[in-house]
Image (tube, rainbow, N blue to C red):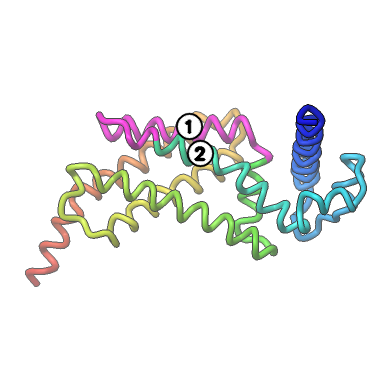
């Protein structure tokens, strides 16, 4: 009996992944709001009834694609930020990580770039929630560093948000540039992060001046 249940579960997971992959392929040429459920099921060779065993609708499928694309980045970026050592080296590694992911999964990140401001509210919110989560993780990691002594929680979150906004811009630039332009995008991304790092080093200087005026 357990063997049979295992086979059924494996088949269910295979069908679910097939629906996600088919949707991603179709979304190369259209937005999620225009994607038809029957298009997806036809591509996989299952019935619409089978689709509803996995997702409540195309919005739920889109949210699953967001999670599939961004969930794995959380642990990787967290591991980089948790490393001790030179902060610029860690930032360089984070840029390289993003570049590798975009190169390996361009369709996933094109989907994110398109739907971040798209017409499906549930998906927009799922992307926004992921980005907020990234900002909070970055803020927490930066807050543990000696350079952040005296920083408020609000300012750390602002700094984390700057890094995440930079990540999003870099992703879009990599998608636009393609493989031939990746090196230049990475070079500029590193320089921009260093500029943020310089500003971070003098942020409290500006706060002190403001309190004196």
Figure quadrant of the C terminus: bottom left
The residue where tag 2 is placed is: 73
**Residue reaching furthest to the bottom:** 213
Image quadrant in which you'd find residue 181: top right
Q: CB under 8 Å between callouts 2 and 1? A: yes
Q: Residues within 10 Å of mark 1 (few under 14, many from 20)?
A: some
Residue 189 shown left or right of residue 62 in the figure: left
The stretch in magenta equals 79-107
**Secondary structure category for the residue under label 2:** helix
**Secondary structure category for the residue under label 1:** helix
- Confirm whether the magenta stretch covers residue 81: yes
Residue 121 shown left or right of residue 142 in the figure: right
Residue at 78% x, 52% y: name it.
30
Residue at 65% x, 45% y: name it.
110
- Give above or below for 149 relative to 86: below
Image quadrant in which you'd find residue 101: top right
The residue where tag 1 is placed is: 97
Q: Residue 57 — which label?
A: none
**How many numbered dots are placed on residues in this image?**
2
Image quadrant in which you'd find residue 77: top left
- Give above or below for 36 relative to 72: below
């Amino acid at each position: 009996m357990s063997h049979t249940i295992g086979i059924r579960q494996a088949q269910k997971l295979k069908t679910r992944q097939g629906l996600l992959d088919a949707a991603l392929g179709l979304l190369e040429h259209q937005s999620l709001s225009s994607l038809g459920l029957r298009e997806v099921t036809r591509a996989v060779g299952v019935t619409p009834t089978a689709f509803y065993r996995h997702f409540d609708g195309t919005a739920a499928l889109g949210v699953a694609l967001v999670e599939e694309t961004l969930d794995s980045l959380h642990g990787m970026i967290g591991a980089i930020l948790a490393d001790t050592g030179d902060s610029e080296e860690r930032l360089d590694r984070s840029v390289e990580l993003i570049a590798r992911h975009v190169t390996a999964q361009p369709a996933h990140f094109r989907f994110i770039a398109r739907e971040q401001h798209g017409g499906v509210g549930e998906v927009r919110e799922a992307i926004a929630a992921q980005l907020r989560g990234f900002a909070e993780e970055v803020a927490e990691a930066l807050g543990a560093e000696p350079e952040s002594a005296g920083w408020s929680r609000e300012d750390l979150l602002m700094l984390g948000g700057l890094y995440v906004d930079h990540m999003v811009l870099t992703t879009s630039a990599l998608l636009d540039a393609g493989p031939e332009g990746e090196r230049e995008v990475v070079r500029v991304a590193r320089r921009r992060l260093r500029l943020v790092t310089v500003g971070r080093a003098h942020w409290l200087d500006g706060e002190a001046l403001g309190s004196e005026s």
